[in-house]
Every structure is written in structure tokens, then in C-alpha cells.
Amino acid sequence: MSYRIPIGPYHLALEEPYKIELDCQGERVVGATLKVGFNFRGIEWLAERKNITKAIALMERVCGICSNVHSMTFCMALEQIGAVEVPPRAQYVRVVVAELERLHSHLLWAGIAAELIGFQTLFMQIFRLRECVMDALESVSGNRVNYSMNRIGGVNRDIDHPEAVRQAVRQVQDTMSRTLIPLFTTDQTVAARCRGVGKFSLAEAIAYGAVGPVARASGLDTDMRRDQAYLAYNALDFDVPTRTEGDVLARIVVRALEMLESCRIIVQALERIPPGPLHAGDIYTVPPGEAVARIEGPRGEVFYYVRSDGSDTPTRVKVRTPSFANIPTVTAMVRGCDLADVPLIQAALDPCYSCTDR
Amino acid sequence: MSAAEIRKQIGGSWEERGDGWWLSLPPEQIRAAAGIMLAGGARFAALVASPGSQGEFGLSWHWDLKGTLLSITATLAAGRPAPSIVDIYVGADWAERETRDYYAITFEGREATPTLMLRAEDAPGMMLPPAEAGRP
């Protein structure tokens, strides 16, 4: 018997609005349609009506998890238009904050995944660990959500307490490698719930334009940090974990391994951070021009297009978030799956509806 | 296929900039270029629309191949539809729907372009000046 189940806009796994309508035959999902836009704030429209200094603060409000990458990518687009050189020390500070943000984003996601799998203890362990990373971010920026680190041509604050960051990284490294990664990769409950679920092929990843861990778990070897080597990433050693299975388990493994790579990056960046200024001076306008800036956010490639007419207000700001690219992939992933697996498949995308709706 | 091979197959005068490679094409050549991008393994990244001063739109389609940005721009005369590439890149669906939401641009070659961010009953063109969007 065929029937349609409307789910949402209250989300199955996350407290964000989004609607999915599932076409089912018995317990088998045969198709899905999505509805987003419940959180639409018109951020691009707003950005084109504010001066660039105010727009930097606005861009941090695109997302409550990866707030830093949005202000950073926006600044990088403006720096490209204005040929502004970011001092080396500022580039390292940006790397450290971006990687701490990746850690807390991945840990948030891992906690939610653990809860969905039915592993409450693991959820609590992961959230305790995430708290250490949040504390490190607070020690750097004074904030836990919107860090206000970025400005055109550099950063607003230095890393005054590198030992607090190192300590958080050590804790993440120890717990991830000794407990969480073995659990996620060898536990029978996790494997039974995740292996072979939500399959997504490499060809589909290309056609859908999937990004970040979702793409890498399907064998699409892409990472802007390595491929474009922006900021100080080309001076740091790290690997880009990929998997070819394209299932929920592969997405879990990719993110778990990425956390260890982020720890490696932060440790190296703190060791090698050069002395020098934090920014290139006060910049309130950039010359006329246009630029695309792309960086690797926790959920994948963040894409910004900015156009300037030389005034203090951008004439066009386009924000393509990773979740905007990844969420449509769920229609392919749920096709043929059991109805009970839909929440886990959706959560395995690490979707952010705030980012998507902007 | 490498980014250089894709550029060669598409042809035209590509310009290398700080952010990647850019090419300007007439709108009717976009679909052929998208087909070459897919055959070359390039990932569709974004569609950007920017309004001009005479009612025309600048559209740019962006692809990524191993970190190299390949961007193709086209100018759309006022009131003209844009070519849809959804049948080539299913990932362009939301990008085209959002572009219609924002600028009331229609896409030729797809059955329908439903709203994405707006509600179904909302008029498209929320980023247009009120007079052009038919709003008070």
C-alpha cells in the first residue's frame, strides 16, 4: 500500500524547522520531497543595505554553529577585491579559530548522532568533550557563539592563552583516539544502525553538488584547505580523510577522523604562529570589483560572491552555505531505505537549516 | 578530465583571476558547457544572479574541479528566461528556484520552478525594487 507521510516543519532530530514528505510503500521509502525556508531571514538582502563593517557582524548570524567561517569568508572576498594582504599572524589566528569551530561543530553532530543511534552515554561523553572546545573558543574570543574575530585585512584579537587551546586539543585528541573513534568504528550497535544505510554514490555526489564530509564519505576527494590552500593551510601538515562506502557509517568515520586532523592543525599552528600585526589597518571600503571566496567550513565548502561599486555598501552578496548544497541529497539517500532510518540519514548530513534559509 | 581540458572543450577566452577561471558566454551556450562540466567530473557549486542598471541580469554559474573554480557568466536581457541545467545537474534545482524567488527570473527547460524560500502563494522577486516586483 502506498501512502505519504508529511514530517515537519518540526524536525525529527534537530530543533530547527524543515519539512520532508515521504512517499512509502509499507515501511519502504520510495521518494521524498523537501520544503525549506521556514527560517528565511533575507540575509543577502540585508547585507546589500549595510556598510561592510556592519555586514561582517550580520554574516556571523548566518549560522549559530559555524558563525566564524561566514564572517571570515565574507572578509576574504572583500580582501580579494581590495587586494588586501592579511598579515601572517592573523592568518594563523584565523586557522586556529576555524579549526576549533570545526571541532565543536563535529562534536555537536557526533553527540546528536549518538543520541539518535540510541547511545545516550556516548551522547553525554561527547557533549562533555565539546564543552572543552567551547571553553577554548571563549578563551580566545570572549564568546561562545559569535566570536567577532574577523575584520577586513585580519583579526580583532590575538590568541592570548594558547595553553587553554592546547589543553582542549589534548583532551579531544585523547578521547577521540582512545574512546570515541574505536567506538564509532567497531561498536556493533553503531555498525548495525549505520552500515549500508543512506547510500550515496560518487556520481550522485557530483550531480547533486555535495560538499564536505558528505561528499568525502562518497569518495569525492575535495577539501578547500588543501585544494586552494588559503590562509596558512599550505604551511601545515594534515590529511583529508575519505571513504568510498557512501553510507551513514562512512560519514561518521570521515568526521571522526577529521577531528584528529583538526587537532593536528591547531597544534602545528600554535607552534608556528609568527609574531607580527593582527590586521592591515582600518578598512571601510574596497575598490569596485567582484570576487568569489571559498573556504572549507565544518560542513563543507562555503561559497561567497561579493560585488562592490567602491562605496562602503556591497552591491551584491551571495551566500551559498554547505547545507544548502547538501540537504537536497537526502532525497537520493532515503530512496529505498526503511522508514525508521530516515531520522538517522538526515542527521548524518549534519544539516543546518539556519544556514540553508539564511 | 582536468580543468584545463574542460576549458579547452568549452572553448572561448577564459580569464584567470585570483579566485579561478572566468568565461563569458551567450545564455544559449550554458547548457552545452554544463554538459562538458559534468562529463569532466566538475561539481556544480553555485548560481549567482546580479541585477544590472537597465533591467538586465548578470548570471554566473560556478563549478569546482579539485579546488579550481570554473565560472561562466551570461547576460540575460530584461524579461528573458534563463536556461535551466537541472536535467544535467540535479543540484542546480534549489539554486534556480532561489534565483526565481529573489529576482523573478524564469528558467526554460524545466517543468516548473516552485518557490524555495518563499511560500507558494508569494510573488517572486523579493530582491527586486518594489516597483519592479509589482509590490506597493
Image (spheres, coloured by chain):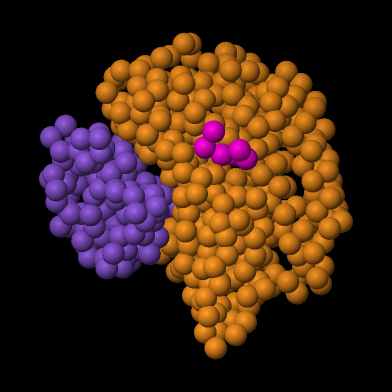
Chain colours: A orange, B purple
- Name the outermost residue toward the front: B136
Q: Can I make out residue B127 in this image?
A: yes
Q: Which percent across, then down, holds residue B96? A: 32, 54
The rendered magenta stretch, by its main secondary structure, is classed as loop
The magenta segment:
A61-66
**Residue A150 sits in quarter:** top right
The image position of residue A355, as x and y in percent, is 52, 44
| Residue drawn where x is 69% and y is 42% of the image | A103
Residue B63, visible in the rendered structure: no
Give left or right: position of B10 versus A109: left
The reply, left or right, for residue B2 in relation to residue A302 is: left
In the image, farthest residue toward the bottom = A1
Q: Is residue A64 magenta?
A: yes
Kindly give the residue lying farthest to the top in the view shown: A281
Image quadrant assignment for residue B16: top left
Image x and y of residue A124, in percent? 84, 50
- B127 or A240, nearer to the observer: B127
Residue positioned 20% across, 35% down in the render: B131
Q: Where is residue B63 in the image (x, y as percent from the top left)?
A: 36, 52
Q: Camera-side residue: B131 or A276?
A: B131
The residue at the point 66 percent across, 65 percent down is A344
Give me the residue at 15% from left, 38% from top.
B55
- State whether residue A279 is above or below residue A325: above
Residue A270, compared with residue B6, is above or below; it is above
Image quadrant in which the N terminus of chain A is located? bottom right
* Position above or below: A238 against B29: above
Count up the numbered dots: 0
